[in-house]
Amino acid sequence: MKSEKYTVIGVMSGTSLDGIDIAEIVFTVKDDTWKFNLLNVETIPYSDAWFDRLKWAALKTEQEIDELNQSYTKLLGTVILDFIQKNKCEPDLVASHGHTILHQPQRGLTLQIGNLALLKETLGLPVVCDFRVQDVAMGGQGAPLVPIGDKILFSKYDYCINLGGFSNISFDLNNRRLAYDICPVNTVLNHYANKAGADYDDKGNWARSGKINTSLLQKLNANVFFTKEAPKSLGIEFVFKEVIPLIDAFDCTIADILATYVEHIAFQISENIIIKGSTVLLTGGGAFNDFLIERLQHYLPGHKLVIPEPKTINFKEALIFGLLGILKYENQINVLSSVTGASQDHSSGVVL
């Protein structure tokens, strides 16, 4: 590495549409051991108009997506610049994931908007972005990308599980890092909470009040995706095409839908924990869903579930994309072929 210390702005917008996560991180590396310090952090929520534009972006025409990309890049640049100026940050670079609106690796397609050259022009700083496209072009899934960060920064845990828009898992097996998406989480839970006028199901209390529809649960668990071998990943299209239509075909109350879907999530995650008596790190917005954590512990009675402090829960992905940005900037490997299925390990992303 050229330097032993970096200050980075990590930026992430997840499919759960909670908002734009921005984190100022100081990384230090000594003898190939990385440490981090999360400094200023903030989630900038989307306006109702932006929420709707992003939620349904996958259904737009190519021209509409191009226009959306321009507008979103402008929004992202403004938000990041405001954060830097407000907190008097002096970053070496900005690492921005952008927002995924299309992810179909089986067709060689993935698109994260917000990664246009306008971003660098707005910020006047080196920007590393567009982390997924190269991996898909090399035959990979383009996801998940966080596992190399799990390996570098959170290696003391047997498993790292993110409970965000989707759940994904990362772990070492036979000296190889493996990782893949498990199932949708907040993309579905929030969708039904939104239908009832709420932003989300606070602590899972709504789901706790419902009853499990066993027929719906069985059909959810029967999806062919769960039988596929890794590497595998999910996009928002899976939710709109396979999950929501299935749930809507049942005559259930919102509470019963949430209860049933929480059970589905907990069961599917537990099916992927194969190391006995393991320690499992849980991050992402779903870590605040007490009912989901209880149901997960129910399925994993001999395992230790670890929920870190709120900064790490909320900003772990922004943190790790900050790390991926440094690795790309230094032309170091930041994507593992054992995780994505690409033809080889590589240094992915674009430096603007």
Image (tube, rainbow, N blue to C red):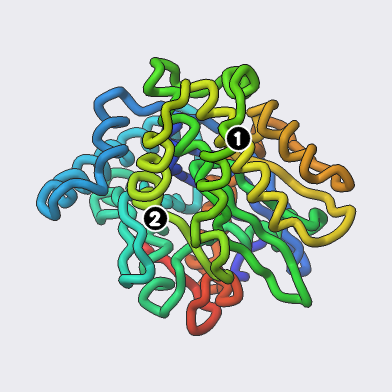
Please tell me how crowded label 1 is: few (under 14), some (14-19), or many (20+) other residues with Cα within 10 Å. many
Q: Is residue 12 left or right of residue 277?
A: left
Structural distance between the alpha carbons of marks 2 and 1: 38 Å
Query: In the image shown, does 273 or 72 lie closer to the viewer?
Result: 273
Locate the N terminus and report the quarter of the image it occupies: bottom right
Disc marking residue 317: none
Mark yes or no: residue 248 visible. yes
Name the residue furthest front. 215
Q: Position of residue 291 (x, y in %)?
A: 68, 27
For mark 1, give the secondary structure.
helix
**Disc number placed over residue 127 in the picture, else none:** 2
In this rendering, the answer to whether 86 lies above or below 174 is above
Q: Please tell me the numbered disc located at residue 262.
A: 1
Identified at 71% across, 75% down, the residue is 176
Residue 8 visible in image: no
Above or below, comparing residue 188 to residue 114 in the picture: above
Q: Residues within 10 Å of mark 2 (few under 14, many from 20)?
A: many
Task: Give coordinates of residue 331: x percent, y percent.
Answer: 51, 73
Q: Nearer the viewer, residue 25 or 337?
A: 337
Q: Earlier in the sequence, mark 2 or mark 1?
A: 2
Q: Amino acid at mark 1?
A: Val
Please give the name of the residue rendered at 33% of the width and 49% of the height, measured from the top-left corner.
241
Helix, strand or loop at label 2? It is: strand
Q: How many marks?
A: 2
